[in-house]
Image (cartoon, coloured by chain):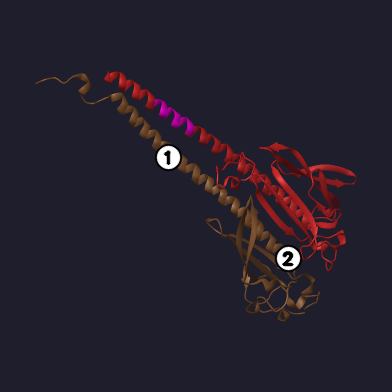
Chain colours: A brown, B red
Amino acid sequence: MPVRPAHLRFPFMPQTLMALFALACATYYSWTRQRAIVEDQIKLVQNEVEMIAASVAVDRLEEISSKSFDQSTVGDSVLSSSSGLTASSSFGMEAGDQNDIDDYHNGVDTLARKAGTATLDYRVVTTVTYAQESAPETSSSSPTKVKTVTATVTSLNVKVPSSVVMKRSFTCGAECAW
Amino acid sequence: MTTLLDNLLAGVIACTVGFVLLATQTRMNEQTIERTRYYAARRSQATFLQTLERDLHNVVSLSSIKMGASDSTFSFTAYLDSTNTTQGTIGYRFRRVGTASGTPIYRVQRQVTVGGSTTTQGGTLNALTGWGIEARSDDDQTVTTTSDARLIYVWFSGASPLAGLGGRQTLSSVGSMHWEARYRPPLLRPDTDI
């Protein structure tokens, strides 16, 4: 049987083949690392978008904090019983100004915020419920001295895993004298 | 000849592999630094915001209307503690601390004056690219006297990963992370009794 010359025996150019295999491994490693870096960067950007969303929620809750507790306490009127408060079923925008907390119920607004040279739009959904006086995190179907406002802010430009939800409870204070 | 070519090609490919690994490692190191800086900045921002919000909610009266220029101070009288009625003068001093990538960098220091003694208590990192604080009327308009002020508008911007949108994202470049909110101190409302 004739013997092949050394340069034609398998493996043909063995060092090149091994180097190519190493290159393939390095390319795969580099690709997976780059993908992880990009995912990490996306998370940072989402975090930033959520932070701006938090500022939008704070803005909305601060605005609501300056309003009267109820339509019947506008102008510091004092109520002697909870029957004078607006029923939950009547929450929502009334004719005229938003002058009390429950006027913001089911309100949907779009607010813009700067982010560098770009402008990001956010949708703010506000809901208002009565809450139990002893446990403000628990809603109540009947009127109480506490209203809990929930502002849910969603980015309209950048896809983020979840909306920012911020809650704040407001008490009636001296206007509710019972 | 084949052996020579084999060695030559293997050498070129090995150099390429080395370059790919080096570039990947460098990028990973940069990313780690960026992430660390980002979360440090975020923690600092959260602490600063918490203090700022508490101060603004405890405002009794304002001494300033507007502040935005470098090395100026926005000051007001406020309750220093929610558990007692100790009042003091709180000033937010905004000053330039240098430049980064040609952009001026600022920081804000919180200065508290009680009984004639002023101390610096808190502030931001040296990472702000802009800051503004302004007393406004109830309908968000500029006021000329502090007695007309009903809300305090605050904004600031700083380093952010958003800075790189559309290009390379890096915290090492100066960005423009943005925060703005309008705080409504209860004691600035005319119908609030002390």
Left of B81 or right of it: where is A131?
left
Based on the picture, tell me whether residue A132 belongs to the magenta stretch.
Answer: no
Q: In the displayed structure, would residue B150 be above or below residue B86?
A: below
- Using the rendered image of the protein, determine whether residue A120 is visible from the camera's viewpoint: yes
Left of B85 or right of it: where is A162?
left
Residue B190 percent location from the top left of the image: 84, 67
- Residue closest to the far front: B1
The label on residue B140 is none
Chain letter of the residue beneath label 1 in the structure image: A
Q: Which residue is found at the position 60% from the left and 54% from the top? A: A50
Mark 2 — residue?
A65
Q: Magenta residues: mostly which secondary structure?
A: helix
Q: In the displayed structure, would residue B188 be above or below residue A88?
A: above
Left of A129 or right of it: where is B92?
right
Q: Which residue is found at the position 39% from the left and 38% from the top? A: A28
- Residue closest to the far bottom: A83
Amino acid identity at mark 2 = Ser
The label on residue A31 is 1
Extent of the magenta region: B14-23
Residue A35 percent location from the top left of the image: 46, 43
Q: Nearer the viewer, residue A21 or B168?
A: B168
Check disc 2 and report its element: helix, strand or loop. helix
Chain letter of the residue beneath label 2 in the structure image: A
Tell me the quarter of the image containing the N terminus of chain A: top left
Q: Nearer the viewer, residue A90 or B134?
A: B134
